Image (spheres, rainbow, N blue to C red):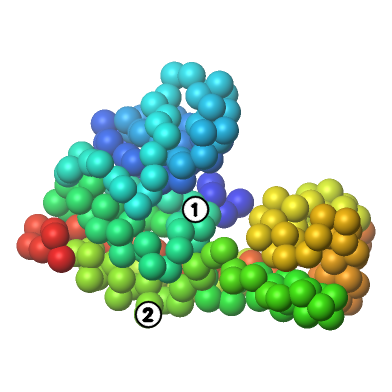
């Protein structure tokens, strides 16, 4: 079972529940939640993603919104998020956690999965080595990949009780065959590619592929070294909301 679908199973949405999907993207998992009878609102800070979600699932409620500025007050039985929260800077993570807490009713739950500590570490090391070898400065990584203790403490400080937290390996085949790694780099690592001039980016990608190929290319396709952090947390009735 794919990661997103198994996370929806962990959420176990019930008919009549109100659920917020943070970082809904094109709405595929939002629709799965709705199919189980829940009233779901999907939010994303990408206008293009929201537009695609509305076109694909016009019957659902999708909104352009920023996870660092959630404007809901006790509106939801659950907050759901898959592969989105690691795109938020470490400095802004407390804003997201407090916003999620405010959005939940007492007894409501957060079910989330994001890139965890060590996620795509080998890919990042290859990018860094290739950029340095080409004589350019390293950019800061655009992601936040926390460990269990770090993120559980963040959620607890925001007023949530963490009842499940697991960090696990998820080696993931990349679509595209021989071009799978270059496609992944273009989609998710543009911040690193921009460290070199456009006319040298193909050279950079080629060097990254060379460095990764011995361990990450098998049977005609690429494997990304994903590590996922999965969490379930509950909002109790005695948290301090405005810390």
State the SS at label 1: loop
Q: Is residue 207 above or below residue 129?
A: above
Labelled disc at residue 208:
none
Looking at the image, the residue that sits furthest to the left is 238
Residue shown at 59%/69% (left/top)?
Answer: 141
Residue shown at 54%/65% (left/top)?
Answer: 143
Q: Nearer the viewer, residue 84 or 64?
A: 64
Q: Position of residue 49 (x, y in %)?
A: 55, 35
Q: Is residue 79 above or below residue 33?
A: below
Spatial distance from mark 2 to mark 1, Cα to Cα?
19 Å
Q: Nearer the viewer, residue 104 or 102?
A: 102
Indicate the quadrant where residue 59 lies.
top left
Q: Visible in this render: residue 108?
A: no
Residues tagged 2 and 1 counted as in contact (Cβ below 8 A): no
Q: Is residue 169 above or below residue 186?
A: below
Q: Position of residue 1 (x, y in %)?
A: 61, 51
Q: Which residue is mark 1?
A: 84
The quadrant in which the C terminus is found is bottom left
Q: What count of labels does the image hold?
A: 2
Q: Position of residue 92 (x, y in %)?
A: 37, 62
**Position of 122 compared to 145: left or right?**
right
**First along the sequence among labels 2 and 1:** 1
Closer mark to the observer between disc 2 and disc 1:
1
Q: Visible in this render: residue 186?
A: yes
Residue shown at 66%/60% (left/top)?
Answer: 191
Q: Residues within 10 Å of mark 2 (few under 14, many from 20)?
A: few
Q: Position of residue 206 (x, y in %)?
A: 90, 65
Labelled disc at residue 149:
2
Residue shown at 85%/75% (left/top)?
Answer: 134
**Position of 103 compared to 10: left or right?**
left
**Position of 189 compared to 197: left or right?**
left
């Amino acid at each position: 079972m794919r990661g997103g679908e198994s996370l929806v199973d962990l959420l176990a949405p019930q008919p009549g529940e109100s659920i917020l999907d943070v970082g809904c993207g094109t709405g595929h998992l939002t629709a799965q939640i709705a199919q189980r009878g829940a009233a779901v609102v999907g939010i994303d800070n990408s206008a293009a993603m929201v537009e695609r979600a509305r076109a694909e699932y016009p019957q659902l409620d999708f909104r352009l919104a920023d996870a660092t500025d959630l404007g809901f007050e006790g509106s939801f039985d659950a907050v759901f998020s898959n592969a989105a929260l690691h795109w938020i800077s470490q400095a802004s993570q407390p804003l997201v956690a407090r916003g999620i807490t405010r959005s939940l009713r007492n007894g409501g739950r957060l079910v989330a999965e994001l890139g965890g500590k060590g996620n795509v570490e080998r890919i990042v090391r290859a990018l860094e080595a290739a950029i340095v070898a080409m004589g350019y400065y390293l950019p800061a990584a655009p992601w936040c990949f926390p460990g269990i203790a770090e993120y559980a403490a963040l959620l607890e400080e925001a007023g949530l009780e963490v009842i499940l937290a697991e960090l696990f390996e998820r080696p993931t085949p990349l679509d595209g065959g021989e071009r799978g790694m270059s496609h992944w780099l273009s989609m998710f690592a543009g911040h690193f590619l921009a460290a070199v001039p456009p006319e040298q980016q193909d050279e950079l990608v080629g060097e990254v592929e060379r460095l990764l190929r011995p361990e990450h290319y098998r049977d005609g396709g690429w494997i990304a070294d994903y590590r996922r952090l999965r969490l379930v947390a509950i909002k109790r009735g005695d948290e301090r909301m405005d810390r």
